[in-house]
Amino acid sequence: MHLTPHEQARLLVATAADLARRRLARGARLGATEAGALITDEVQEWAWDGLPLSEVVRRAGSVLRADQVLPGVPAKLHHLQIDALFPSGTLLVDVIDPVGQPGEKLAGSGESTVTADRPEMIELNAGRPKREVTVTNRADRTVRVTSHVDFASVNPLLDHDRTTTSGWRPDIPAGSSISFQPGETRTVTLVAMAATRKRA
Amino acid sequence: MATIDAHTYSSIYGPTTGDVLGLGDSGLVVRIEQDDVAYGDEILGGCGKTWRDGFYVRGSAGDSELDLLVSNVVLIDPVLGVRKTCIGIKEGRVVGMGRAGSPDVVDGVDLVVGPHTALVPGEGLVATPGAVDSHVHLASPALVDVALSAGITTMVGMGIGGVWDVGVNPRYNIHTLTEAFAEVPINIMLLARGSTTDRGAMQAALDAGAGGFKVHEDYGASPACIDACLTVAESADVAVALHSDSLNEFGLLADTIEATAGRTIHAYHVEGGGGYPDLLEILQEPHVLGSSTTPTIPYGKHTLEELFPMTMNVHRQTPLFASDIDTTHSRLHEAGIQAENHLHHRGAISIINSDALGMGRIGEMVRRTWQLASHPALGAGGGADADTRTVLQFLAKITVNPAIAHGIAQHVGSLQPGRLADIVLWDPAWFGTKPELVLKSGFVAWGAAGQGNGSTRSCEPRVMGPYFGAMGAAPRRLAATFVTENSMRGGQLVPGPTYLPVRGTRGLTRADMWHNDAVPRVHVPRDGSPVEVDGHPVQVAPLAHVPYGQGAYLA
């Protein structure tokens, strides 16, 4: 058979999926391991048959209902990444929450959810010096600027008064960005960087 | 004013102060008590994120550069509590917790990230110290992979494989087993058999690399053996684990307690499944550190039924001797098991261990701990603050308390700065069952790995197994063998492994056990009626369904 490690792993999935089908057939509810295997197995076979990628992703969410799995299972299957062999080659089938939203609590289930015991909104960079700057994008393409860049060092084609922005960064969530379209002028709020840093 | 809604915040950066996080499918929750990161200054890896040169990565960090950072993780530690933080690691040990990044960019940086620091993203994950299993029969090498796959990073073990033994002796066997364990990414302490009055032989075992003793009735647990073993242990600074005399052959429980003469001892099986039928009463002695094992945790519908054949098989009892059948029946104490479950919640039994391959399951030590912790009739579900206390109490039983009892708490059992960075990362939904990653001495050694041909690192099926820290000679660097301080100077250890010293085992009392320091009055009626704790009879109904079970495992 000349099996590769990848093919052997596929057989492991097939075996676990068959176990899941046997359990479903006698009315038993599934745990996360065999439930994940069943979804993975179905995805692999729809891919084999050449269904469109988007259709395979859509169908992955219809393999199991929440009442066919044990409590806590939907949260455990929050995200499945499945590399499947289509007639057109191997493609990543990215599946989110295939057994319902983990937040949808079943009676008696202990889903792993986060509940907030604090204000609904969290203020970012609270209590720090802030200022506004007006910026025009002179480039012929979009420029994106992220949360922790020293604003005086951004793309030279983002036209603004750089004597005022050294030691200041965008006042936005860490790891997010703001985009400037070609020719666009907009005002953004900046927040002071570390106190030890030289600041305009 | 920049704001973000609380749900989005926790989805991106992980839960924060005031959030209540569910642990697995039990309903057990913890409250995040503090968040070391300032809102708006979170460290994140990836395209456009903050983990970049000149952002949170300092251009030149010099000597303070970390080897590895676990970012934005919910730390649950029996000593440090529950907090959202970053964990900094250098040379295999925890350097500190707190805010990570570059002091040029953010204020209040505790952990300076340099251009070559590695990142394990911890957003949305829970970190606990690697578990310490203080009762492992090393009857088969198959248990090592199972232990790592359950989040156990330290084993206190006995036996050499393929045999029934309660210790590792003599030098040839100690050296051979030590060399074998140098190749696997798990810390090991070998207990020598202490069931002898030959003090010279016991000292020789310590010199050759044993890190403590086990006294077991199958090899002799008479008051004379206990006294001799404790005498050697007192002078060498090692722990003694005791499986006492089920038969009352050499005396009663009081005689064994008298033989200890106030010297610290780790009493295995205090529920009475191995040892005196009334062994639970030993918990009245402050110098006794008590543990009990997986088969009776939690007390279930069929616990008693399975214990009979298990006891017969393990302890080499034959059905052809009526006396063996009678002896085995005498070891099964339903009232004792109920009281054991209660006394864990009372904090009188300080340690849970597996008794792997010798009447226990190593892959279930951690999950059974959480099954008992979340027991609805024993106090779980009392709200976030009560649950948080329970979580820390039960985590201590499988981490810091066995580490203290065996003199290795300066290295393992907690993630306080200076300890080995043996860190287990859990997806909260899978908490207590299947870890995401196991870091051994600050290097990824084990975990759920996606397919080798995968386009991402998480392509199904994800399978628990070795990472590079478990390969080649890496385990020699990452895993420790615990031995006496004297043996490290004595020249009789086999060369090769990384040795670390045992320290501080003597003079310990229950008061040294984190979150488990109760010393109640315990009376075990001779007629099998309920055990009395502080004068009150204790009864616990058997569980018919447990969390951390079928929802997570297909078998």
Image (cartoon, rainbow, N blue to C red):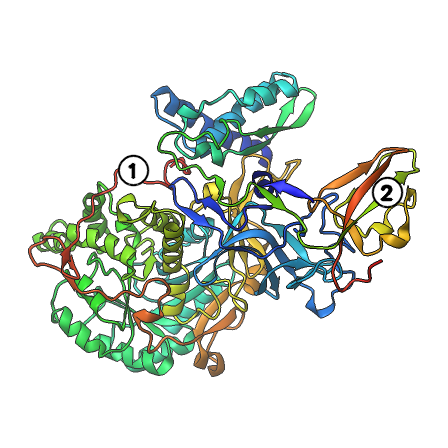
Same chain shared by disc 1 and disc 2 = no
Q: Which residue lies under the disc numbered 2?
A: A134
**Front-most of B550 and B225?**
B550
Q: Mark 1 lies on which chain?
A: B
Q: Name the residue under label 1.
A: B545
Q: Is mark 2 on a helix, strand or loop?
A: strand
| Picture quadrant of residue B188 | bottom left
Residue at 18% across, 72% down? B256
Note whether A95 is above or below B81 in the view shown. above
User: Residue placed at 44% from the left, 49% from the top?
Assistant: B30
**Residue A60 visible, this angle:** yes
Q: In this view, does B44 lie to the left or right of B258?
A: right
> SS at mark 1?
loop
Alpha carbon separation for disc pair 1 and 2: 63 Å
Q: Mark 2 lies on which chain?
A: A
Which residue is located at x 74 percent, y 60 percent?
A: A194
Task: State the quadrant of the N terminus of chain A.
Answer: top right
**Within-10-Å neighbours for mark 1: few <14, some 14–19, many 20+:** few
Q: Is residue B411 above or below residue B201?
A: above
Q: Position of residue B177 (x, y in %)?
A: 43, 64
**Residue A138 place in picture, x, y as percent:** 93, 38
Q: Nearer the viewer, residue A72 or B160?
A: A72
Query: In the depicted view, which residue is nearer to us: A196 or B295?
Result: A196
Q: Which amino acid does label 1 sit on?
A: His
Mark 2: give few (<14), some (14-19) or many (20+) Cα within 10 Å. Answer: few
Residue A28 falls left or right of residue A165: left
The x, y position of residue B29, in whole percent, is 42, 46
